[in-house]
Amino acid sequence: MDLKPGSRWASQVCDTEIVVVRAASAGVSLECGGQAMVPVGGDRAPGATPDPAFAAGSPIGKRFADPASGLEILVTKAGAGSLAIGGVAIPLKEAKPLPSSD
């Protein structure tokens, strides 16, 4: 799986679509709903359904980052599947706190 910055990927089991913001330092297997993601417009598995363990959903406009691999992605289309790398859920990237204006 060639996850270059700017590349767009789609879930095989739901409507989720993402764009890669920062590439991983090594090759990883990006998954959504328990199935490998495919390039947008690529062939999807017919009749595939999300794995219940990976069905928490992916909200639009949220960034997900994996600190171990360095991969950062942005959800461009929401869906029912949750994002993972090799079967391990990717955590939501927290916003940086703004400095206080005393």
Image (cartoon, rainbow, N blue to C red):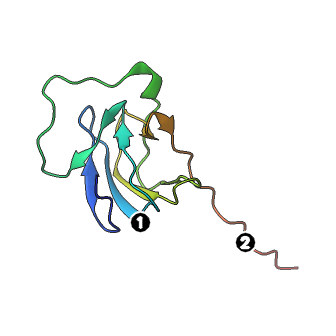
For label 1, count other residues whose C-alpha is less than 10 Å away and answer few (under 14), some (14-19) or many (20+). some
Q: Give neighbour class at mark 2: few <14, some 14-19, many 20+ (Cα, 10 Å).
A: few
| Number of marks present in the image shown | 2
Between residues 3 and 32, which one lies in front from this camera angle? 3
Mark in front: 1 vs 2: 1
What secondary structure is found at the residue carrying circle 1? strand
Between 81 and 87, the residue placed more toward the observer is 87
Q: Tell me where residue 2 appears, x and y as whole percent.
A: 28, 58
Whether residue 54 is situated above or below residue 96 in the rendered picture: above
Left or right of 98, for residue 7 = left
Residue reaching furthest right? 102
> Does 88 sit above or below residue 38?
above
Query: Which three-letter amino acid code belongs to the residue tagged 1?
Result: Val
Q: Which residue is mark 2?
A: 98
Of the pair 76 and 43, the residue shown nearer to us: 43
Residue that mark 1 sits on: 21
**Residue at screen point 15% across, 37% down:** 44
At which x and y percent is residue 78? 35, 44
Question: What amino acid is at disc 2?
Answer: Leu
Q: CA distance from mark 1 to mark 2?
A: 22 Å
**Is label 2 in a helix, a strand or a loop?**
loop
Vertical placement of 39 versus 13: above or below?
below
1 or 2: tag closer to the N-terminus: 1
- Residue 12 percent coordinates (x, y): 23, 36
Q: Residue at x 27, y 23 (%)?
A: 49
Tell me the quadrant of the picture where the C terminus can be found: bottom right
Q: Position of residue 20 (x, y in %)?
A: 37, 61
- Name the residue rendered at 35%, 68% in the picture: 5
Residue extending farthest to the front is 26
